[in-house]
Amino acid sequence: MSGTTSPVRRLLVVTAVAAEREAAAAGLASALVPGAVTTDSLADGAPATPFEAAATATGPTPAPHPLALHATVLAGGVGPGAAAATTAAALARAEAAGRPYDLVVSAGIGGGFAPAVPVGSVAVASAIVAADLGAQTPDGFVPVAELGFGTSRHLPPQPLGRTVAEVLAAAYGPVLTVSTVTGSAERAAELADRHPGAVAEAMEGFGVAEAAGAAGLPVLEIRTVSNAVGPRDRAAWRIGEALEALTAAFGKLPGAMGVGTEHG
Ligand SMILES: O=C(O)c1cccc(C(=O)CC[C@H]2O[C@@H](n3cnc4c(=O)[nH]cnc43)[C@H](O)[C@@H]2O)c1
């Protein structure tokens, strides 16, 4: 059961930076058979490589079952533009190779809306929202969709999105994509006011979702919280804690999708 229209056999996970990629890949590798996880970095032109889990099992390596889940974890760069470009390139490359993806996940660390979503917790998107794409007017911000151009949000497939949130014990609500990290209490309050129930903000989700949508693919966003959305205090970001939470979350993801751990 995947919650998408067909079973997920090939998964593309898009993070921003290498530390996030390694954390997500380690979690997936802990849940899948050896060889089922590949890492990639279109941002620096590096080729895809099989992901080697830190603790390698001894004995013969079972071949991944042809129907098992295969995942590629990509570090696609920071911000919605880099995320959209690298995701689109990865999807096109896989399609051309005859191995198209079934599901795309935007993932990494993010800011959590306090106090509901504290540092170290997990957030799963019920909607992936372009929170600062639009126009500033004398009456306030107008989203790009209300200006008559495109969309301002993408909706993850159901019931998969909600199931993943439940299995990951995650806060479930809109995750905002911003091009500028929030740095004041006033801005945090404005975003929370404009997006009731928002659980987190980050910088790539909407870009990843635009590329997935253009390819006709479903998309999820999973964030682990390194900092509170609010006054800027970069020294207080708990990046290590958030990366550990990312590994734990991705260790649970295949089970949440109900797919792909069987050996051949
Ligand atoms: O310095 C490091 O070791 C390190 C390791 C992993 C990630 C980073 C980043 O700085 C990633 C930037 C990334 O983080 C997201 N993010 C995190 N908090 C927020 C926030 O409050 N508002 C918006 N974005 C946030 C964002 O998606 C960036 O891509 C460093």
Image (spheres, rainbow, N blue to C red):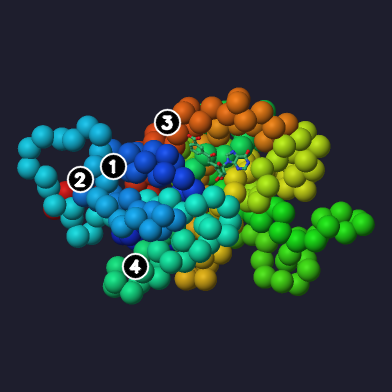
Q: Residue at x 68, y 61 (%)?
A: 152
Residue 166 pos. (x, y %)? 48, 40
Q: Is residue 127 visible?
A: no
Q: Label 1: which residue? A: 29
Relative height, residue 206 to residue 217 (above, below): above
Disc 4, SS: helix
Q: Look at mark 3 in the image and give the residue it sits on.
A: 244
Q: Is mark 1 in CB contact (under 8 Å) with mark 2? A: yes
Across and down, in percent, residue 200 comes to 62, 41
Decide which of 119, 9 is in the foreground and name it. 119
Q: Residue at x 47, y 71 (%)?
A: 215
Q: Is residue 243 visible?
A: yes
- For the N terminus, the quadrant is bottom left
Mark 2 falls on what kind of element? loop
Kind of residue at disc 3: Glu
Numbered tag placed on residue 34 in the rendering: 2
Q: What's the CA distance linking mark 4 and mark 1?
A: 21 Å
Residue of label 4: 94
Q: Whole-Å distance between the Cαs marked 2 and 4?
A: 21 Å
Q: Are marks 2 and 3 in contact (CB under 8 Å)?
A: no
Q: Position of residue 68 (x, y in %)?
A: 24, 55
- Ligand 1 closer than 8 Å to the CB at disc 3? no
What whole-number distance in Å separates the C-alpha atoms at marks 1 and 3?
Answer: 14 Å
Q: Earlier in the sequence, mark 4 or mark 3?
A: 4
Upstream in sequence: badge 1 or badge 3: 1
